[in-house]
Image: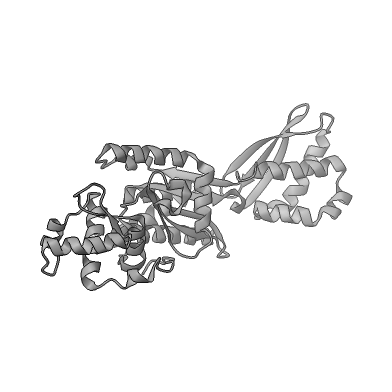
Amino acid sequence: MSSRIERPAPDAASLSGLNERAREIFRQIVDSYLATGEPTGSRQLSRHLPMTLSPASVRNVMQDLEELGLVYAPHTSAGRLPTELGLRFFVDAMMEVGDVSSEDRAKIEAEIKAAATGRTLENVLGEAGSLLSGLTRGAAVVLASKDNARLKQIEFVRLEAGRALAILVAENGAVENRILAIPPDLPASALAEAANYLNARIRGRTLADLRADVENSRATAARELDELTAKLIDAGLASWAGPEGSDRQLIVRGQANLLEDLRATDDLERIRKLFSDLETKTEVADLLHRAESGDGVRIFIGSENKLFSMSGSSTIVAPFRDGNQKIIGALGVIGPTRLNYARIVPLVDYTARVVSRLMERG
């Protein structure tokens, strides 16, 4: 089963016109970088190429690749590393994506299924993130919407004059508590009436469905409820959604994996910046939201997304769906630009499919 990768058009027509010798040298430079993070020199390349070329001939080809913007020399007289454009060209035009091993498939299936038994959706998504971080040795991120939880019950509890607690319980076990501001003289009967009105309409529906229903039947509600009770219902639904953007939950797992295999001080500084980026949860959520607009795996390399432009990191993400085939979230892996793309792409894709199948079964 091949992974679905959304591939943009090549950056320049000249890139696809590389001859076999140039493509092989470029491939060797990228493969070495992904394996070691180190630049590759002409002498080293000449010993490993399938064709016979002198170091001088290899240097000439490397110079051509550099002029195309595919590679660069980090230091004078050093070997070459791929640029972000080079990595993008490699991923889009040259990378051969593998398949998920039977062992990894079984592990993903079993652990996500076990997490789904008697546990909340957040637990399931957290387990999916932990699995991905463990299998890829990167940091895993999962984005999902609270609006997708199917609701079971809502209650309003007076705390003191002017404040009440809204309690919403989802069918998956998730419980959300929010403090509401209410009129000091609001009678207890209004709290009970508001809860009864919503509970008669709430079971098995998502919050988005319920909000739409209440909005569409506002005229009817105005006849059935007094003004204070109607306002309480509006406030309760708004409290569940929270401030703008907070209806999306972001789960991050495995940041410590990014501290492994550091080779230089600049690597440590890059990871420090990435940790800072991951703390900016709103922007991470915005990045994953971009992945929700497509059908397959999305790969963002370095400065292709402004969030990770300073830390030089890559993100591989895929959307997952509910039983109506509606995209309800995205999951993926964040790490250095020398991620093992060929291995991680199918792992992210397969994990997203397993989560989608779980969502389809409810």
Q: x and y percent of residue 15 in the render?
A: 33, 68
Q: Position of residue 69 (x, y in %)?
A: 33, 59
Q: Nearer the viewer, residue 243 or 25?
A: 25
Determine the residue positioned at 33% across, 42% down: 258
Outermost residue on the right side: it is 223
Q: How far across and down, in percent of the image, does residue 101 sit?
A: 29, 61
Q: Which quadrant is the C terminus positioned in? A: bottom right
Which of these two is toward me, 262 or 123?
Answer: 262
Q: Which residue corresponds to the image point at 17% horizontal and 63% vertical from the top-left?
A: 58
Picture quadrant where residue 86 is located: bottom left
Q: Is 14 situated left or right of 236 in this image?
A: left
Q: Is residue 80 left or right of residue 203?
A: left
Residue shown at 25% from the left, 68% from the top: 23
Look at the image and tell me in which quarter the N terminus lies: bottom left
Can you see residue 119? no
The residue located at (81%, 32%) in the rendering is 183
